[in-house]
Structures are given as C-alpha cells and as structure tokens.
C-alpha cells in the first residue's frame, strides 16, 4: 500500500525533534493541528478543522481543500472561543456547521445548539438556527430567536442543500423536527410530538421513521411514524431501559438499534419491523457498544467495538465488501484501530483514520480503484509513537465485589524497579470515560518515569444506564471508594511502588485528586488539582446553577441537595485532613469551575498552615490554551511530582 504525504506537506508546521527517552514538553503541549476531516459526497473536496496561530494561542478555523492537489479553496474563521464542531455536507459544495464554545483545554468544546451554513469557498454564510437567530439569521424577523437546542438528524437521501434538525426547547415539553433549506433558511415543520428531548431517525424515502429518547422514569421512549395518516404512535412497552434506533436498511424494512432491557451494557440489535424479530449484532457483558464501522453512504454498519478496554472490531457480515476492506486495511496497521469516516458516493474514495494508545492518530485517503492510500496529516506530528508506552486494559474487584475496568500505563523502567504511581481520575464525571486511545497526560507522565492508573469508576459511561446512575450523588463516597480500590489493586500487583503514590486530575478529576488526599494522606503522598471544583455547595450556589434551569437540574440529579452531605464531600471543607503537599492550578476566566473554588481550597489549606503550591493564569479558562502557560503547567507538574514521589 503506497503512502504519500498530502495535507501535512501543504500546511507546513515546525516539527519538534523527539529525544529518547525524555520526550520534550513541547511535543505534548502542541494541540492537534488538524482534526475532524469530512469528505465531500463527490470525493473532490475535504473539510478540516485547522488550528491556526493567533497571538499566543492556536484558534480553530474550518478550512476547505480541493482533492487530490490539496489546494485551499475557502475558510471560515469564528470569533475567539467559538469553534466549529461537527459539520455535514448537504451538497457537493455546501455544509451545515455546528457552532460551539471552548470553555478550556480540559473540557470538551460545548455545543450551543446553533447551526450555520457555508459554501466551501466561504461564500453565502448563513446563520440558520439558534439563540441569535433574530440578530444574524436572514429569516430572523420571521422566526425570531430559538430558545432551544438544535441537533441535526440527517440529510435527504439525494442531497439538495436541505437537512433535518430536531428542536429541543429549553422550557418546552415538545420535540419538533424541521426540514431546513440551508440556502434560504426556510423551515418546514415535519414532526411535533408532545414529549421533550426526543431524537428522530429518518427513512431513506425522506420521511420520519422513529422518535426516541429516555423518559424521566429512566425507561426508553419510542414513537413510530405512520405515513398513512401522519400520526405518531407510542410503541414502547416499558420493558426497555434503552432503545435507540440508528439506521434503516435500504428498503426501510429493518432497523439497527442500541438496546438494553435491564440497564446493563447496551447491545446492538437488528430488528425486522414487520415481524418484530430481533438479531443481536454486538453484545458484551462488560461494555456497551462503542465505535461503529459503516461503509458506503447510507450503508448499514458492518462492525462494532466495545466502549471500554481495547476490544477489536467484531464484524457482522464477513462477506460485506466494506468489512473485507476494513480487515485488509487493519492488517496493514497492526496494533492500531482503523476507522472509516466517509466514502464518496461512488464508493471509490475513502477517508479513514488510524490511531492507537501510542499514536494520537493519522488520517488517510484510500482509493479502491488503485488500492493506494495517501497520508493527509497526523494529529500531533511531534509525537513519535515508538517512544510512547502501552496503555494496558485492567480489571479488578471493588470492595463490594463489582468488577471495574481501566488502564495502567507503565513507564520504561529498569528490570526490578517499581516506578511511582499517579492515580489520574477522569473529568465529568458522568457521561465520560477513559478510553484506550492516546492520552497526552498519561503519556507525558509515563515519559517522566511514572506509572499512571486510570479507573472507569461508577458514574462513567460505556457500561450502560445503571452503571452510570450508580455514580449519582456519590462524588465523595462510592466514586472515591472505586478509585482507592484501584490504587490498592495496582500496588498489590507488585508493579508499582506503593510508598510513592500521588493523585492528579483535571476538572472533576481535580476534585477527586484532593478528595483522595483527604481520605488517606498517608497513602496519597501529594495531590494536584487542575481546574477543579472543591466546594460542592459552591456549585449549587454558582451562577451556572442560578441562571440556567437545565444546569441546575443537572447538578441536583448528580449532586443532590443535602447541604450537610455536600460539605462532608468537599475538599475545601476537609483541609485539616489533607496533610500531603498540594499543587493547585487554575485559570482566572474559568466558567466551568470558577476561580472561587481554587481560592477556597487555597485559603482552607493556608488556614491549617499547609499552603499549596499555586499556579494561576488570569486569562485562561477551564484548562490552559496559551502555549507558554501549558508549558509552565507541565513544568510545574513534573517538578512537583519529582519533589514528592520522584527519584
């Protein structure tokens, strides 16, 4: 298979020489320069989010290139802290783009429910849907501002510039579905169901098929559309905790859906709509269905992998030509995961990614007609996968007998030498999980000689509804038990030094890092909180909860409202128990975890005569973007760990 360099050669960035064994900090602070490529239906263009230098930071710009010569033909730059999230081709020359905001580098960009459209040359940009419709939309005087969230549900079978958008009103009890013309902004209402927060699945004949979601009783909600009379009929029988249809077969007689009867890991099933007969395509006792692999446009998925661990793709139909191609290409990249992103409509051109636990990822264009692949770009070109460490999937028993999963990354140590351990809880904590793929923090720490433990504690996603709900209102209790059990398991394996353990995390992970130190400062020799929350009552009293009903409801569900209990689970109220050294890192413009949290934690530690080390960046948000600040953070983290648990 021939591999040549395309986009990465067109947009030249200075590569950083990787020295063994200590990889330069600069290699880790360099963000993904290229991401989220999407191939046009005719295979003649590609849309890519490119981070362009702007002052001390890199800002995301949506850039369009012609193929195969990789010539820039257009670009869309958004205002500071706004980003293009997902985007869909609605014709060969036009896309609709989800607008989002970047609260910081330690949090996924947040969708705002707003949608724009643009031609690939950057012309005819239109604000189509969102809270600023009246100000920016061509038809804003007709529709007014949308006090709702919009989600694209698909595009017509024959692309014509239209797309389907579901409206989830902020204070509405209805779910609406629109057909929107991206050229004129005109909307046509095609569904109105008096149930909130439903998504829709379109049929290949461009009529609605199903509306689905989860009710307040945590059981699946499912409506089926009857085209004969235009009615929506509830078909759920309150026996399924999850039922989410995702694909129609080409003849619209069969659907593929995620399904869980009892709240356990989600399966992938195929159901005949006439007979109701079901066939399980993917099921795993320990993991919900994760990544799906699909072939040519409008084709059904041919394989899936589990959401946890490093499970290989399981193929549903070995005779499927797309599955056969995936097997062939996967064999060309041993130890990595090949993911099909887009096919051209003629099925000849394929856009795909290749990534692993050691490799941040590369993107290729593959031509079926020539059996040749061209490398478009690598996500973090300064990272040499050969110098990175394996993130090994682990399993252990929690104190109540439940099996938990996660990853252990071991550094390159001399034989018989037990490295110090860093427990690194993920953020969220709900709807998030640590995955097998490349993790910059884990690899940075491993490159400095530390073993890194990551646990998918209760509350994490990837194992079904009940596992996620088991972490509700358990931030300071069961979740901390799971993390502590993971530490004890890792020590018992005899591969790490149990006398040199530190906790480090960002966002919720920062909270957990300090809570672990409060639980057992004899075990946790030091703690690092980055952009963390440290006073749970302060969350309930903050502006995010005061002025946003949805956010307030979110916090009540996940935290509860027992003020005394929240104090007992707040590190800022437990400073007298934290005898280990602490490093606090925070941004002055953090809106997800306002600086008041870091100030409260710092003041509490000073009050008990244990002032923390302090790194504060006034102009940063929920994690540092400025390259100099990111470098300072990694330098501080490295120095702090070396001082307390290093060699």
Image (cartoon, rainbow, N blue to C red):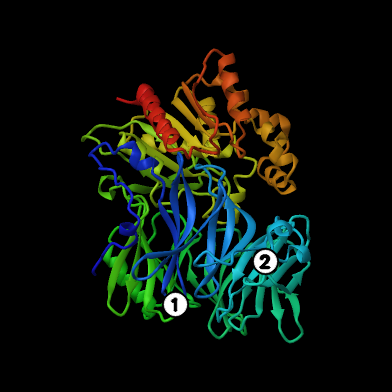
Q: Residue 153, how many percent across, how many down?
A: 61, 69
Near-viewer residue (429 or 640)? 640
Near-viewer residue (487 or 110)? 110
Please report the residue visible at 55 percent of the width from the left and 86 percent of the height from the top: 251
Disc 2 + disc 1, Cβ < 8 Å:
no
Report the Cα–Cα distance between label 2 and label 1.
Answer: 27 Å
Q: How crowded is mark 2: few (under 14 residues within 10 Å), some or many (20 or more)?
A: many
Depicted 14 relative to depicted 149: above or below: above
Locate the C terminus by quadrant.
top left
Can residue 28 be seen by looking at this rendering?
Answer: yes
Near-viewer residue (485 or 12)? 12
Q: Name the residue under label 1.
A: 42
Depicted 137 relative to depicted 498: above or below: below
Answer with left or right where residue 437 lies relative to residue 60. left
Q: Residue 559, how many percent across, how many down?
A: 67, 40
Q: Residues within 10 Å of mark 1 (few under 14, many from 20)?
A: some
Rendered image quadrant of residue 414: top left
Rendered image quadrant of residue 346: bottom left
Answer with left or right where residue 203 lies relative to residue 332. right
Depicted 566 relative to depicted 164: above or below: above
Rendered image quadrant of residue 568: top right
Which of pointers 2 and 1 lies earlier in the amino acid sequence? 1
Q: Residue 254, how many percent across, how many down?
A: 56, 81
Q: What element carries label 1?
A: loop
Q: Residue furthest left?
A: 415
Q: Is mark 2 on a helix, strand or loop?
A: strand
User: On residue 166, which mark appears?
Assistant: 2
């Amino acid at each position: 298979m021939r591999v040549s360099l395309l986009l990465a050669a067109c947009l030249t960035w200075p590569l950083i020489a990787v020295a063994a064994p200590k990889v330069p900090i600069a290699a880790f602070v360099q963000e993904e320069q290229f991401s989220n490529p999407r191939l046009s239906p005719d295979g003649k263009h590609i849309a890519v989010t490119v981070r362009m230098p702007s002052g001390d930071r890199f800002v995301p710009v949506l850039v369009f290139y012609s193929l195969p010569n990789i010539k820039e033909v257009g670009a869309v730059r958004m205002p500071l802290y706004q980003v293009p999230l997902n985007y869909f081709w609605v014709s060969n020359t036009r896309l609709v783009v989800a607008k989002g905001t970047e609260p910081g580098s330690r949090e996924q960009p947040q969708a705002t429910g707003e949608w724009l459209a643009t031609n690939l040359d950057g012309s005819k940009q239109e604000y189509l849907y969102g809270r600023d419709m009246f100000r920016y939309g061509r038809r804003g005087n007709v529709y007014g501002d949308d006090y709702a969230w919009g989600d694209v549900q698909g595009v017509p079978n024959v692309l014509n510039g239209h797309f389907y958008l579901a409206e989830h009103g902020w204070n509405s009890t209805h779910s609406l579905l629109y057909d929107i013309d991206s050229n004129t902004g005109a909307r046509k209402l095609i569904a109105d169901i008096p149930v909130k927060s439903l998504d829709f699945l379109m049929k290949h004949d461009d009529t609605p098929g199903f509306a689905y979601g989860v009710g307040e009783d945590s059981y699946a909600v499912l409506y089926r559309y009857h085209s004969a009379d235009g009615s929506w009929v509830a078909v759920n029988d309150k026996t399924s905790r999850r039922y989410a249809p995702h694909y129609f077969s080409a003849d619209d007689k069969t659907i593929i859906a995620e399904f869980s009867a009892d709240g356990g890991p989600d399966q992938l099933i195929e159901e005949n709509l006439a007979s109701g007969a079901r066939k399980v395509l993917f099921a795993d006792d320990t993991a919900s269905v994760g990544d799906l692999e699909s072939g040519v446009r409008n084709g059904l998925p041919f394989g899936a992998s589990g959401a946890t661990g490093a499970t290989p793709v399981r193929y549903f139909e070995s005779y499927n030509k797309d599955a056969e191609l995936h097997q062939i290409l996967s064999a060309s990249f041993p130890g990595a995961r090949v993911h099909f992103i887009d096919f051209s409509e003629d099925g000849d051109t394929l856009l795909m990614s290749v990534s692993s636990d050691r490799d941040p990822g590369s993107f290729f264009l593959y031509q079926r007609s020539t059996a040749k692949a061209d490398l478009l770009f690598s996500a973090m070109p300064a990272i040499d996968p050969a110098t990175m460490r394996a993130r090994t999937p682990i399993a252990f028993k929690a104190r109540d007998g439940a099996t938990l999963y996660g990853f252990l990354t071991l550094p390159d140590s001399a034989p018989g030498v037990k490295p110090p351990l860093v427990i690194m809880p993920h953020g969220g904590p709900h709807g998030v999980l640590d995955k097998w793929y490349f993790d910059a923090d884990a690899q940075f720490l491993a490159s400095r000689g530390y073993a890194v433990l990551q646990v998918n504690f209760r509350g994490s996603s990837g194992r079904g509804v009940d596992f996620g709900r088991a972490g509700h209102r358990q931030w300071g209790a069961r979740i901390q038990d799971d993390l502590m059990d993971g530490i004890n398991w890792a020590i018992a394996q005899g591969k790490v030094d149990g006398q040199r353990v530190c906790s480090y995390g960002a966002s919720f992970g920062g909270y957990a890092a300090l809570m672990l130190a409060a639980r057992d400062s004899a075990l946790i020799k030091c703690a690092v909180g980055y952009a963390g929350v440290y006073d749970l009552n302060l969350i309930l009293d903050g502006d995010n909860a005061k002025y946003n009903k949805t956010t307030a409801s979110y916090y009540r569900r996940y935290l509860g409202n027992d003020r005394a209990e929240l104090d007992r689970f707040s590190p800022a109220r437990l400073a007298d128990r934290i005898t280990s050294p602490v490093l606090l890192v925070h941004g002055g413009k953090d809106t997800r975890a306002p600086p008041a949290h870091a100030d409260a934690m710092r003041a509490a530690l000073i009050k008990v005569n244990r002032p923390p080390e302090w790194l504060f960046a006034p102009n940063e948000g929920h994690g540092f973007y400025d390259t100099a600040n990111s470098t300072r953070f990694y330098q501080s983290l490295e120095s702090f760990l070396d001082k307390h648990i290093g060699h």
